Amino acid sequence: MARWRKIAVGMAGGAAALAALAYGLDYADRAFPPPVDVAAVVSKEVHDRDGRLLRAFATPDGLWRLKTVAADVDPQFLRMLVAYEDRRFHEHGGIDPLALLRAAGQFVANGRIVSGASTLSMQVARLIEPRESRSVFAKLRQMARAVQLERRLSKVDILDLYLTLAPYGGNLEGVRAASLAWFGKEPARLTVAEAALLVALPQLPEKRRPDRFRQAAEQARERVLTRLAVSEVIGEGEAERASAEAVPDRRRQLPAFAAHLSHLALIKDPKAGVHRTTLDRAVQEGLETVAREAAARLGPKISIAMVMADARTGTILGEVGSADYFDASRAGWIDMTRVRRSPGSALKPFIYGLAFEEGLVAQETIVEDRPSDFSGYRPRNFDMTYQGDVSVRKALQMSLNVPAVKLLEAVGPTRMMVRFRRAAVSPDLPKGEAPGLAIALGGLGITLKDLTQLYAALANRGMPVRLGDGISGTPGIVDGDPLLSPVAAWQVSDVLSAVVPPAGSRRLGIAYKTGTSYGYRDAWSVGYDGRHVLGVWVGRADNGAVPGLTGYGAAAPILFEAFAKSGIAVTALPRAPSGAVRLAQSELPAGLRRFSTTENGLVSTGTRERAPQIVYPPEGAHVELGATAGTEIMPLALKLQGGRAPFRWLANGKVLPEASRRRTLQWTPDGAGFSTLTVIDAAGRAASVRVFIE
């Protein structure tokens, strides 16, 4: 009896000891959890609109460690990894007893370690908590950590940790970083040979680096391919074919696009791990390649900036702040898309557009290009020559200065600036100066982004579009009045689409304009099709002069090359809207056949008669004619005073059927919305009003 009592007491003591041990282990497990938060320190990433990597930044300790999950990786690679490293990964609880027994038996039989018994869970434990030695204690600790990981995480979570932290030589960690560095692509689709190399490298990442120890890398890959378990996964004959594939002999640079925008994204949200932009990686890559190659051709200290956007939505598709962010000789760190510079002649299309809209000129109206004095301001053409009598169409295509200044004097510099504000663009004028005629030739400061935004309205039938900032800014149509009427915008586009491409460039079906600032400091070119707009600036970031630098000679070739290499399919320019016509010079009414101005900027006819004035409808009136009710639109009575008969009326740039000697007229609008009504008398004097038809 005493004997059984002693046994019972012993069993109770053993149970208590086991319970205490279990409690202690559980307490230790909770008190000393595995440091899985190390995997949270990953490279910050900047993505394009479709989630493709544009740029990555090294971690604070200098590692390229891109967060990777199983869904990012080729399933074939995952199967090969498990087959080679841990066949029973999905069955064990962190430690594989069968692998331990196998490794122990091989050690006893051979007197040395033939194969290890580390599971993927144990390898993850070593990665999150690197061991300082290869002692038995370190191994036991690794095993304990593996069990802890299995208790806390799913198998997928453990695999994700491995995919993010596995070493691949140098400062590369994780399968994504390795795939990008060794193969130049994401690991979503890998060949069998590529997958085998990525399986083999983490065991001895420094001694198997393909760029330094190619033979060792090939042998390690071969061991993976010939492992029976792997052969069962990849299929018969695949190992032999994969062995014939060359091992990469160099390490590629990770994607490094959109440097300026990427740094801006980090500044805006420094805590975010992934930053999504509106850029299109293919477009961005094409623009950067063109900028880099063009800068090399143009010479030292030259920088290049580009902005490409969707003209309908305002979304930035590509943005190049400089030819090379890291080129100190070109001040590459300065984002020249946001620096205000003189646009030269690049604003002339908007002067002509406003003149078209107001009915002052048509494309074939004759305008004088001769030396002129505008109250002391004497503009000269770029080549110091004059063309004499030219058509408005030719004057814009040749970018003649005197005709542009004459038209600006007629429409008014202040009105021009008001139109720019309609497009949410506010150029800088010289301090303390009011808008003047020098605007026509670049006498103000504007950024490349804002200039591109103005041209986006031309591609969008005159409706202004606010460009986004490529990150969090909201692009879209600008509320309010149009920059130009659809008819005027079409007239400008029709003229610019016929400008001859620069030497060596083929026609692309785009409209474009160039500009050169005073002193050869800035060269510009902005072009657009029916959907996209691209602005180009060339110059020195320090505002230094570059002799011979012109918009047509330097910026325009880059514009055409960038459009072609952006990967964007050119969209046809907008079709002519209702009322838009291009009349021959002989078909124009008398008042539109020649344009000239008096000292006061009024249309000159050599007479002192009072100019015509539209008295009804008044400027800015909203007139209800049933246009929004779905019923037949009623005609609108037009009334004028002054002027000399006969009178020619234009509605939205379209000449109404017949000239009339009467001072009243009935006009039926095409539909609801803003309309511009213009009357021109026999002396060529004009008046315009803008009304809203409801």
Image: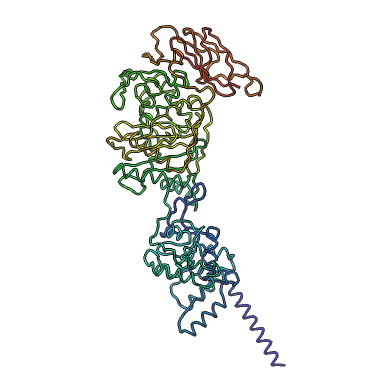
Snapshot quadrant of residue 402: top left
Q: Position of residue 12 (x, y in %)?
A: 67, 83
Counting the numbered discs, the total is 0
- In the image, residue 215 sits, relative to residue 306, either above or below, namely below
Out of 350 and 135, give the one closest to the viewer: 350
Q: Position of residue 286 (x, y in %)?
A: 42, 45
The image's colour scheme reads rainbow
- In the image, residue 507 sits, relative to residue 639, either above or below, namely below
Q: Residue furthest right?
A: 1
Q: Position of residue 370 (x, y in %)?
A: 32, 19
Q: Position of residue 568 (x, y in %)?
A: 47, 41
Out of 188 and 505, give the one closest to the viewer: 505
Left/right of residue 94 with respect to residue 588 in the rendered view: right
Left/right of residue 20 with respect to residue 263 in the rendered view: right
- In the image, residue 602 sits, relative to residue 83, either above or below, namely above
Image point (41%, 31%), residue name? 427
Q: Residue furthest left?
A: 547
Image point (59%, 17%), residue name? 668
Out of 426 and 34, give the one closest to the viewer: 426
Indicate the quadrant containing the C terminus: top left, top right, bottom left or bottom right: top right
Indicate the quadrant containing the N terminus: top left, top right, bottom left or bottom right: bottom right
